[in-house]
Image: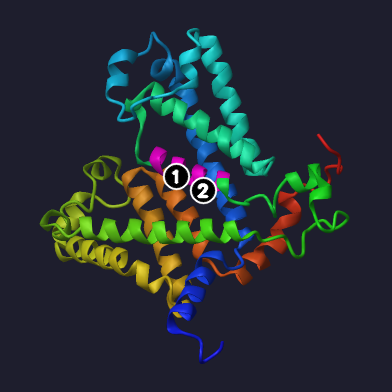
Amino acid sequence: MNPREPVWERGLRAWLQFWFDQPSVTALAFLRIAAGIVLFYSLFIYSFDLSSHLSSSGWGDLAMLRQSDPVAWPYSIFDWFASAWWIWIVHLLSILTAGALVLGVLPPLTGALSLLFYLSYGHRNPAVMVDLDALLVMLLIYLTLAPCGRVMSLELRLFPERRRHPLLPLEPDPPRPPWGSFILRALQVQLCLFYFMSGLGSLVPDWLSGSLLLPPGLAERGLPLGLETFREVSAWPAGMARLLTLLALFYPVLVWLPRFRHLVLGVMALVHFVVGVMWGTLAFNAAMIAMQVVFVDDELLEWVRHRAGPLLTLPWLPQTRL
């Protein structure tokens, strides 16, 4: 760095380096696999009550439900088909597309198709949309634009000419386009904003007192503790609620510090797992755990990739084109 260089030029160079530095394509690949698994699970759950939610003879009037959709033009593929048989065909195609995204078969195409399919469910019946759906839509948009198929992808086996070293089972130095770094940084910033806004929203007396920490349904299921146990030790709910609020508020600061990064990521993963079990929202919290991978150090991800990569790229598959 030139000491005589103006401050604004050094600041601009540091700003551009932050957004367009060498990205971790391994982090994007892990995010693709994890988010794709959650997407596959979410679509599979639809199968148990598909006709009731999406067919014209279901439990709700589709015209009335459509009025509750905040989108001005609620496009849905299911509007093309009236019979339940065709709705099932589209549903199976969406599940297969999600599976192809997990395996890394043309991620830009399968990601865009998965986004189109998944939006069609919500626009067909907005009443079935939950927080998980909004999170998955956001992740699918990012993954469609990101180079998430450069490693740990079946595409590397189907199109070996796209690799620098087609004869090797793993890509030792995968290409890292600068737009991948921008998308990864955008995901990191958005995750920090998510936690910070969640922490600000928790600064209310009902939450800080701990009365909202334990869902009422937990006592009915008996997992893992009943409400009476927490009432006997009244300081525990309030203390845990305030600790979670502080963790959400300071996450955007601590996660950028290398010394505390992995500790914070581990604590947040544990918190999301416990909350998912307590509130019965394992799919949503699994997606939130998957998003933590965007902050994991690239060296650790590369270590995992070189051990799990041969399984994820299916080395027994012949290297032939589609």
Q: Residue at x 37, y 59 (%)?
A: 271
Region in magenta:
132-144
- Label for residue 138? 1
| Secondary structure mainly formed by the magenta segment | helix
Q: Which residue is mark 2?
A: 142
Q: Nearer the viewer, residue 309 or 64?
A: 64
Instruction: Say whether residue 126 is left or right of residue 23.
Output: left
> Taking the image as drawn, is residue 13 in sight?
yes
Q: Nearer the viewer, residue 259 or 14?
A: 14
- Which x, y percent locates residue 207? 17, 56
- Label 1 element class: helix
Q: Is residue 8 magenta?
A: no
Q: Residue at x 17, y 63 (%)?
A: 238
The amino acid marked with disc number 1 is Met
Mark 1 packing: few (<14 Cα in 10 Å), some, or many (20+)? few
- Label 2 element class: helix
| Quadrant of the drawing holding the C terminus | top right
> Taking the image as drawn, is residue 59 in sight?
no
Is mark 1 in CB contact (under 8 Å) with mark 2?
Answer: yes
In the image, is residue 23 above or below residue 35? below
- Which x, y percent locates residue 213? 22, 53
Toward which corner of the image does residue 171 lie, by quadrant?
bottom right
Q: Is residue 139 magenta?
A: yes
| Quadrant of the drawing holding the N terminus | bottom right
- Which x, y percent locates residue 60? 31, 15
- Label for residue 106? none
Toward which corner of the image does residue 265 lie, by quadrant?
bottom left
Q: Residue at x 25, y 63 (%)?
A: 245
The amino acid marked with disc number 2 is Tyr
Instruction: Say whether residue 271 is left or right of residue 208.
Output: right
